Amino acid sequence: MVPFSALLVFILRLFGAKIGKEVRIKPGIHIKYPWKLTIGNYSWLADCYIENLDFVHIAENCCISQQAMLITGNHDFSKTSFDLITKPITIEEGAWIGAGAIVGPGLRVKSHSVLTMGSMATKDLEAYTINQGNPAVNIKERKIL
């Protein structure tokens, strides 16, 4: 049991987050806009950072580890006006974002893929793969026993 998890889920729901059953959320989490967040059943979020200027969809049975970052916005550095660009992030069922890992705007972390500790996803991660590095590359297949 995670102390205060039920309270955090309750508060996030009050502010418009759509959260499934048996979701665990640890204290210290940062969520920019709860109304742009969906979390599926049985997912676990540690003290991570969700900068959801656009929608973030986290499916069932996912893990977002300590100090991981989900970033949906960036600026267009090719323009003098430095326009804000936002794109949604989708974390599919069974995916795991490791401690200190970063997922960039507009990405899809496909079913049961892993982004290892400290890695940075700059493109979609394929299903049942383990991805590592900066930028993250597929290092091997994820086998679930």
Image: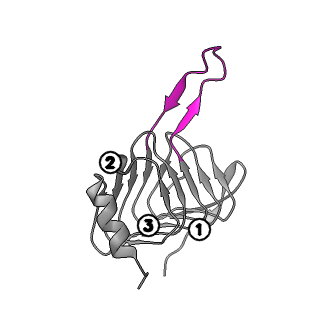
Q: CA distance from mark 2 to mark 3?
A: 19 Å
Q: Which of the two discs, 2 and 3, sits closer to the camera?
A: 2
Instruction: Where is residue 96? Give x, y as percent.
Output: 52, 66
Q: Residue at x 59, y 60 (%)?
A: 68
In which quadrant of the rendered view does residue 20 lie?
bottom left
Q: Amino acid at mark 2?
A: Trp
Which element carries disc 1, helix, strand or loop? loop
Question: What label sits on residue 66 in the rendered view?
Answer: 1
| Viewer-closest of 90 and 124 | 90
Q: Amino acid at mark 1?
A: Gln
Q: Earlier in the sequence, mark 2 or mark 3?
A: 2
Q: Which residues are magenta?
A: 71-88
Q: Residue at x 49, y 39 (%)?
A: 106
Which element carries disc 3, helix, strand or loop? loop
Q: Is residue 7 above or below residue 77?
A: below
Q: Residue at x 53, y 46 (%)?
A: 124
| Residue 40 visible in the current orientation | no
